[in-house]
Amino acid sequence: MTGESPLLRIVAIVDWYDGAREGVAQLATSWGDWWYFRTLATHYDPESVDHCLYAFTAFPAEAVPVLEEEFGDAGRPPIMWPDAPGEVTAQTFAVVEAAAADPAVPSLLGRVTGRDRRCELWDVYRPFGFTGSVWR
């Protein structure tokens, strides 16, 4: 990573507990736009929202048109579901459920660095053996 601090353009949060735990993000990166993310590690902060390290997995190419159709407006504020049922189409829900059920080995690790929705990202050079059963 070359000091790039990409902006989280769009975030759809699937699970929340004192911070985002799982969801969809559109990142302005050279690795690609659409990512499924899941919490890898958490640092408890009794004074604020917990600090999280996330594992990012790129969505497969066939999922990108669905995500673009659903979340393509970069001016849209972040959404959260399932707290807001009906926020997303059934097709989008199916794409995200498929990513959650069998996530690929992450290709990026990252953390949000501030309220400006910037994040630090690190390449994963060697797969570290997570499988779908370990993630759930």
Image (cartoon, rainbow, N blue to C red):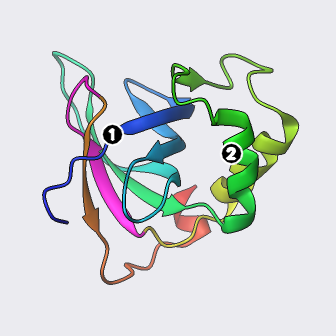
Q: Quadrant of the N terminus?
A: bottom left
Q: Residue at x 47, y 72 (%)?
A: 130
For label 2, the SS is: helix
Residue toward you, 30 or 91? 30
In the image, residue 59 above or below residue 41: below
In the image, residue 106 above or below residue 3: below
Q: Is residue 97 visible?
A: no
Q: Is residue 85 left or right of residue 108?
A: right
Q: Is residue 18 left or right of residue 21?
A: left
Q: Which residue is mark 1?
A: 7
**Over which residues does the magenta segment extend?**
107-116
For label 1, the SS is: loop
Q: Which residue is mark 2?
A: 67
Determine if the magenta segment contains residue 108: yes
Q: Position of residue 31 (x, y in %)?
A: 41, 65
Residue toward you, 124 or 16? 124
Give the quadrant of residue 79. top right
Q: Residue at x 29, y 70 (%)?
A: 123
In the image, residue 7 above or below residue 16: below
Q: Position of residue 125 (x, y in %)?
A: 30, 81
Q: How many marks?
A: 2
Which residue type does callout 1 highlight? Leu
Q: Quadrant of the C terminus?
A: bottom right
Q: Position of residue 120 (x, y in %)?
A: 22, 49
**Could you give the CA–CA distance between mark 2 and mark 1, rounded to whole angstroms?**
17 Å
